[in-house]
Amino acid sequence: GENVEQHPSTLSVQEGDSAVIKCTYSDSASNYFPWYKQELGKRPQLIIDIRSNVGEKKDQRIAVTLNKTAKHFSLHITETQPEDSAVYFCAASSGTYKYIFGTGTRLKVLA
Amino acid sequence: GAGVSQTPSNKVTEKGKYVELRCDPISGHTALYWYRQSLGQGPEFLIYFQGTGAADDSGLPNDRFFAVRPEGSVSTLKIQRTERGDSAVYLCASRDGNNSPLHFGNGTRLTVT
């Protein structure tokens, strides 16, 4: 069945450094890839998404890259700040109703 | 505007009891999802509604779980004969079209004692 693998499961970076989280998907029909940030005890919130017709998208300190050939996509956070500390989830959708989520990455930004 | 609303935010129940969890999606969103999230895990798909009908309930773990959406808006997730293993955060989400983001509610934290 469809599967999304996410790495690493935990990531600690110094404030100001960059953080990269990677996801790999199995369904070659996947064409929509959202990223969610979930703070402790709160709802997952969309932070950025990318569709398969582009290879990269950027929004201020956050960027996502997509490699359709390799079936992987990555989240890049630059100039990390303590408030970036949270759990991040990737997801993949094939244009139907199914969204398959990764297992999450716990990011800790050390002040 | 109003987001996805879930009630109650917390529910503690005894093993064997029946519980109902409510989700009020964003107005106009025809697609509604229920997910379950255990500590340290990603959201696990339970059921998907398109309008009033359950288009895919393949994620429901067993026949103790049931969900309805009678008027195509509010949905209720029903769990019979609760077990301690049902303890988790139950998330509801809605969206307004294919390849558009899911908007999540704050979830209901269910604890079965």
Image (cartoon, grey):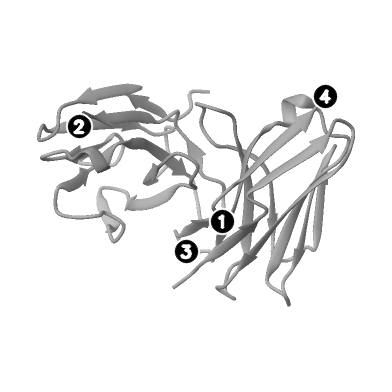
For image coordinates 18% across by 39% down, the residue present is B78
Q: Give, as a three-letter code, the residue at label 2.
A: Glu
Mark 4 or 2: the one toward you: 4
Q: Secondary structure at mark 2?
A: strand
Q: Give, as a three-letter code, the residue at label 3.
A: Thr
Q: Residues within 10 Å of mark 1 (few under 14, many from 20)?
A: many
Estimate the x, y position of residue A63 in percent, counting from the top left: 80, 48
Mark pair 4, 2: CA separation: 43 Å
Q: Residues within 10 Å of mark 3 (few under 14, many from 20)?
A: few
Mark pair 3, 1: CA separation: 7 Å
Q: Secondary structure at mark 4?
A: loop
Mark pair 2, 3: CA separation: 28 Å
Q: Are marks 4 and 2 in contact (CB under 8 Å)?
A: no
Q: Secondary structure at mark 1?
A: loop
Mark pair 1, 4: CA separation: 37 Å
Q: Earlier in the sequence, mark 4 or mark 3?
A: 3
Q: Give, as a three-letter code, the residue at label 1.
A: Asn
Residue that carries the numbered disc 2 in the rendered image: B20
Residue that carries the numbered disc 4 in the rendered image: A111
Residue that carries the numbered disc 3 in the rendered image: A96
Label number found at residue A39: none
Mark pair 4, 3: CA separation: 42 Å
Mark pair 1, 2: CA separation: 30 Å
Residue that carries the numbered disc 1 in the rendered image: B99
